[in-house]
Amino acid sequence: MSRLNTEPNLDDPDGLFAALMDAHRDLDDAASRRLDARIILLLANHLGNTALVREAIAAARLGEA
Amino acid sequence: MPATYTNPRYPFAPVRDAGARHKVVVVGGGLVGLTMALDLARRGQKVVLLDEDDTVSFGSRAICWAKRSLEIFGRLGLGEALLARGVTWNTGRVFFGDRQVYHFDLLPEAGHQYPAFINLQQYHLEEALVEACRATGLVDLRWHSRVAAVAPGPDGVALTVETPEGSYALHADWLLAADGARSFVRRALGLSFIGQEFRDRFLIADVVMRAGFPAERWFWFEPPFHPGGSVLLHRQADDVWRIDFQLGWDSDPEAERDPARVAARVRAMLGPEVEFALEWVSVYSFRCRRLERFRHGRILFLGDAAHQVSPFGARGGNAGVQDVDNLGWKLDAVLRGAAPDALLDSYDAERIAANDENILNSTRSTDFITPKNAAARAYRDAVLELAGRYAFARPLVNSGRLSRPAVLADSPLNTPDDAPWTGGLPPGAPAADAPVRSDGQPDWLLRHLGGDGFTLLLFGPPGDFPALAAGGPRPVFLTRTATPGALHDAEGLAAARYAAGPGAAILLRPDQHVAARWRHFDAAAVAHAQRCACGITITDTQRMAG
């Protein structure tokens, strides 16, 4: 069973962050929310592993605290 | 309002047996109560059926009958008449705004007697059930008979029944409560539901019109003609169409019932040029919940009295029909002394698991149709936005997961496979249909399975198997070439659907669920599995022998 990788794994961290910021430019809150949801659904489908997404949800909730 | 249907009125017959004791009393003469009475009567059991009203349902109510229900009604002698009377459909479309985002086919393969669904107004079905009950001569239909008191005892239930000519007492050895969502029997026993209520309202309009829509299930999320809500369209018999508008929790149910207001909504949808008439209007909200247990000693609950879901998915009426299918043969076996009382506990185990599956599916559909907060709405809309362009998002669109028969995978009545088996139908699964030939004539496999007893499906000619002992299951042989005494699996679809090679044996319960299967027939194993499926323990066997 694969485990969620929480070690540094991004090829271009600053580029990724900038791409996300650019994507949300000019969008209101509701449109931003839908865009994020579409991105998450596309990536989740690419992963094809609901257990891994559940792990990411749990890890994301920890990050909030 | 105009009517394509006039409710029949059934007369009250004076009661001559006050104080009498009856083996089986069914409370509730709706879809589920009538089906229950018919099932038992066709097994030779006498049934008293009590209904507080004097007619079938007002308004179309449940309209979508799933393939499994049609197979069950087929066993009860009504399948082909319903198929002829109803509107057959297998496919559906989902729209978001004015765009189609999803198209589905619920029966993509050929070789089944019944389609995925027919649509037929509940009153037509109930009227057919009343006639079929009468024809058995074993169902005592008592209209205008309202149960006013229920007193459970160790060997039965004492009832007080109110009629236009006063009250009387009667005693039921077994009481089957099919008295609907507001079940009096449930309230009399002080039983509460577990589950949840949804904060949304829907408007049902049954509209008479000649319209150009195909016989498909069409579901719109936020169409231009009904901004902010969803709409569901179904075709019924007699040019009646069901339109279901989502109204939202803040809507005023009284104001929304106003025919002029309903007509305006319908006109916005159909356009000014389509002529239509309203036949029935109803505003509803719904719950997804069930009783903690369906069996309470000599009282068994079924249908809406036991469990309720949202209408999206057609899992209400169809679940009730499957309740009947599960309970009928078991109660009959107990009444005949062929199975211990404990067999009825498996009704609880099997139907609770099946209805939990319905409740889960219904709850998930509802969460998609009625998002609970801004994030849920964003995800819902994101799915719909993606589904038009990307195939991956289409399975996420949830406008209702339509009724599928329960696979009783964890049933205590199952005998697990004794060897690995790839594909086919595992213990607990409902039998698959397949086209066969019987004496050279086209026929369907399901017509030969279950019903009044257990069936053993044997893959091979009769000569390949030893003679079966009396009292065991009825053998049905299937062969790839035409053979006397066997069904001819000419297309090989039966062998394929059961993943069964030559010599294989599959034991089917009277309700056509698989009890056990073997790659190679073994008489002792079959006998053991049949005892297990009848709830007979080793102790019972010794007691019966002694």
Image (cartoon, grey):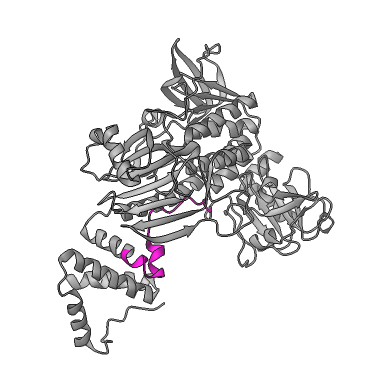
The quadrant of the image that shows the C terminus of chain A is bottom left
Q: Quadrant of residue B311?
A: top left
Closer-to-camera residue (B449/B252): B252
Residue at 52%, 14% (x, y): give it. Answer: B19
Task: Please state which of residues B270 and B376 is positioned toward the viewer in this rendering.
Answer: B270
Answer whether residue A4 is visible to the viewer in this image: yes
Asked if residue B476 is positioned above or below residue B164 in the image, the reply reads: below
**Residue B400 shown in magenta:** yes
Q: Horizontal placement of B285 versus B31: left or right?
A: left
Q: Residue at x 25, y 87 (%)?
A: A8
Point 36% across, 57% down: residue: B95
Q: Quadrant of residue B503?
A: bottom right
Look at the image and give the residue range highlighted in magenta. Answer: B385-407
Does residue B520 appear left or right of residue B361 in this picture? right
What number of labels is visible?
0
Q: Which residue in the rendered view is the most extreme toward the bottom?
A: A11
Whole-percent x, y for residue B361 in the image: 40, 53
Where residue B187 sits: x, y (%)? 36, 30
Residue B19 located within the stretch drawn in magenta:
no
Up the image or down, B174 lies above or below A57; here it is above
User: Could you say where residue B97 lies in the image, as x and y percent from the top left?
Assistant: 31, 57
Residue B524: where, in percent of width, then height? Answer: 73, 54
The quadrant in which residue B306 appears is top left
* Nearer-the-camera pick, B61 or B475: B61
Residue B298 appears in the rendering: no
Q: Main secondary structure of the magenta part?
A: loop
**Which of B271/A35 is in front?**
B271
